[in-house]
Image (tube, rainbow, N blue to C red):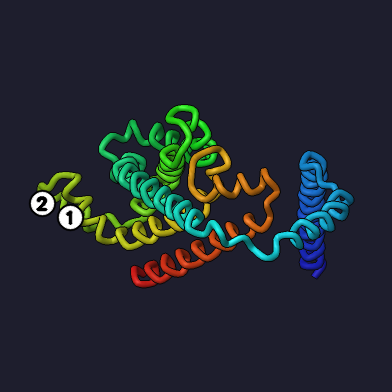
């Protein structure tokens, strides 16, 4: 009896020590998070007083935006078409480049394992630089206009889409691939006929997502001179022409909403 009681007491003491240790770790994690957000709040320059002062000013500006200026709707429609075209061509170019890069960056099927890590590093570099920054660089290289926006979208999306494609290929079941390889077929043939049919629907869905995303992202590329409706948006902001600005924003919302619905419908059909 005494031995059993002693063992129970030891178990209780061990549990208390473990609980104390877990509680200490929890407090340390909470303190670290609080310190992180305190520093972040200061570095981000959060000033609620400025917000309280600025909101009424913004409200007065918005009050002057009614009624919207509809005189330039044909121009806005053409600029919006430029934006959609930039996103479409940039996304298509990125996906075409992403497919072979995804094979190199896929650990299970890459033909040159030594290039696996360099391929991943290259894709991470492309993903780490936003299309806005790429567009800014290409404006300096090729001049103002939509072409710089297409190149900026293509490079950033190339890295992001290829990384996702490579992850899809790595998670695919390799049984059919190995069976086709066992017949003497080449690696590319096995990928096309054994792996791609399984991952093609999710790749197409991802492509549609990136096209939809790039339409939204490219609306601001005009700020750096990369063409599209963003150029007119920037001009209206510079001139404080709020009726014109509201019209542009309304056009963007209508087009983006329509494309979101269309893209969602297509993804559901592919699922």
Query: In the displayed structure, does residue 160 sit left or right of residue 17?
Result: left
Q: How busy is the neighbourhood of tag 2: few (under 14 within 10 Å), some, or many (20 plus)?
A: few
The residue tagged 2 is 183
Quarter of the rendering containing residue 247: bottom right
Task: Evaluate whether residue 210 shows in this view.
Answer: no
Give the image location of residue 211, x and y in percent.
42, 55
Give the image location of residue 238, x and y in percent.
67, 43
Q: Are marks 2 and 1 in contact (CB under 8 Å)?
A: yes
- Residues 183 and 251: in front is 251
Kindly give the residue lying farthest to the top in the view shown. 141
Residue at point 77%, 60% (across, down): 15
Residue 114 versus residue 220 in the image, above or below: above
Residue at point 49%, 28% (across, down): 140
Q: How busy is the neighbourhood of tag 1: few (under 14 within 10 Å), some, or many (20 plus)?
A: few
Helix, strand or loop under label 2? loop
* Mark 2 vs mark 1, CA separation in Å: 7 Å
Helix, strand or loop under label 1? helix
Task: Evaluate whether residue 236 shows in this view.
Answer: yes
Give the image location of residue 122, x and y in percent.
43, 34
- Residues 164 and 156: in front is 156
Residue at point 47%, 58% (across, down): 74
Residue at point 53%, 34% (across, down): 136
- Residues 187 and 264: in front is 264
Give the image location of residue 236, x and y in percent.
63, 49
Query: In the displayed structure, does residue 199 sit left or right of residue 183?
Result: right
Residue 67 versus residue 123 in the image, above or below: below
The residue tagged 1 is 179
């Amino acid at each position: 009896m005494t031995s059993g009681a002693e063992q129970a007491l030891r178990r209780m003491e061990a549990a208390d020590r473990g609980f104390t240790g877990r509680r200490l770790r929890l407090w340390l994690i909470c303190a670290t998070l609080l310190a992180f957000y305190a520093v972040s709040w200061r570095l981000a320059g959060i000033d609620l007083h400025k917000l309280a002062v600025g909101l009424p000013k913004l409200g007065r500006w918005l009050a002057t935006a009614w009624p919207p200026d509809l005189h330039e709707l044909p121009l806005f429609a053409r600029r919006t078409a430029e934006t959609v075209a930039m996103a479409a061509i940039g996304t298509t170019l990125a996906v075409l480049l992403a497919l072979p890069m995804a094979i190199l960056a896929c650990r299970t099927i890459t033909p040159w394992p030594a290039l696996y890590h360099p391929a991943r590093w290259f894709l991470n570099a492309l993903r780490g630089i936003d299309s806005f920054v790429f567009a800014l660089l290409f404006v300096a290289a090729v001049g103002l206009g939509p072409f710089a926006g297409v190149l900026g979208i293509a490079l950033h999306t190339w890295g992001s889409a290829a990384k996702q494609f490579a992850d899809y290929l790595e998670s695919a079941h390799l049984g059919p691939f190995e069976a086709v390889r066992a017949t003497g077929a080449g690696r590319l043939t096995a990928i096309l006929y054994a792996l791609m049919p399984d991952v093609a629907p999710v790749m197409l869905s991802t492509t549609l997502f990136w096209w939809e995303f790039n339409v939204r992202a490219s609306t601001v590329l005009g700020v750096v001179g990369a063409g599209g409706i963003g150029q007119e948006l920037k001009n209206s902001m510079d001139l404080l022409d709020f009726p014109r600005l509201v019209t542009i924003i309304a056009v963007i919302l209508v087009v983006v909403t329509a494309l979101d619905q269309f893209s969602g419908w297509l993804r559901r059909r592919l699922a």
